[in-house]
Image (tube, rainbow, N blue to C red):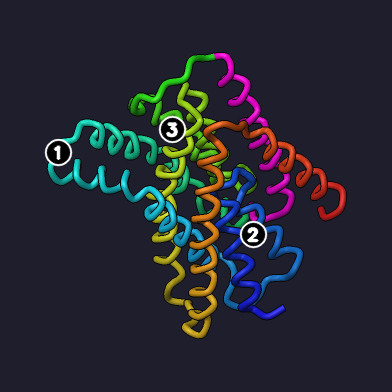
Amino acid sequence: MSDYLVGIILGAIQGLTEFIPVSSSGHLILFETLFGQRPGLGLNFDVAVHVATAFAVLYFFRKEWKLLLDSFISGGNPEGRKLLLALIIGTIPAVVLGLLLGDVIETQLRSLESVAIGLVVGSILIMAAEFLYKRRKQEDRPFTPLQALVVGIFQSIALFPGISRSGATISGGLFVGKSRYEATKFAFMLSTPVIFGAAGKQLWTTIPTFDPATLPLFVIGFISAFISGLFALSFITALMKHRTLYPFVIYRLLLAGALILFVI
């Protein structure tokens, strides 16, 4: 299998699994473990495809981002200001945990054992969120600072492989009483600054060792992740208007069981 084909596949895996709550980092680690690490791939490549999914969020929710930009510039839109404040507060927990444990997570927890554990723990979070969701009244009002902080804490847990950023943050939104669609939209918008921040931190430390010969591979992976990310965003936002996350829980637990029985 050529490196370019691997780049396309890994980009597609990242784009699809970043927004579908099955853990993008877990699937990337699984694929790289099963098929072998290729030259030019690794953490730098992971950064490239993660940034592609962040751009997919920017494009998919471009109307919401424009609202934020307008409110930031003019200060005349109260809804935009509330959303901007919620995103800032919700980003803080992941930034703090990333600064404290980011290097440890990236270097010592990139294993199938960690992925299997994360898949199970993330599934428990999702099931708990779904259980509570049916027992409380949902609202579509803007996120309060406290609600945003709670969702941000859920997002920070997803720094561990296998948890799933989308699964954790959507679960956080359901925990604080938001509708499925509002929880999903906020979860994806909240992921954007964290992805760009983590990418910037990673590039700052690894750019001196970057091999220009691998640039075409990175571009192919980026395009693949961006296109598949847009598809996944369309799918999951439509699905979450009327469906639960339980089918993804079943998949996650089956995958965790398969890892434990046949791979680890």
Q: Is the Cβ of the residue at disc 3 closer than 8 Å to that at disc 1?
A: no
Q: Looking at this view, is 117 or 130 the one in front?
A: 130
Q: Between marks 1 and 2, how big is the CA–CA gap?
A: 41 Å
Residue 25 % position (x, y)? 60, 54
The numbered mark, 2 or 3, whose residue comes first in the sequence reads 2
Residue lying furthest right: 261
Closer to the camera in the image, 176 or 202? 176
Is the residue under label 3 in contact with that under label 2 (CB below 8 Å)?
no
Earlier residue among tags 1 and 2: 2
Q: Left or right: where does residue 260 sit relative to residue 106?
A: right
**Circle 2 residue:** 28
Magenta span dominant secondary structure: helix
Q: Amino acid at mark 1?
A: Gly
Q: Mark 3 sits on what residue?
A: 182
Q: Which stretch did the figure color magenta?
A: 109-135
C-alpha separation, residue under disc 2 versus residue under disc 3: 28 Å
> Relative to residue 112, is residue 45 depicted above or below?
below
Residue beneath the point at 45% across and 44% down: 188
Q: Is residue 248 left or right of residue 51?
A: right
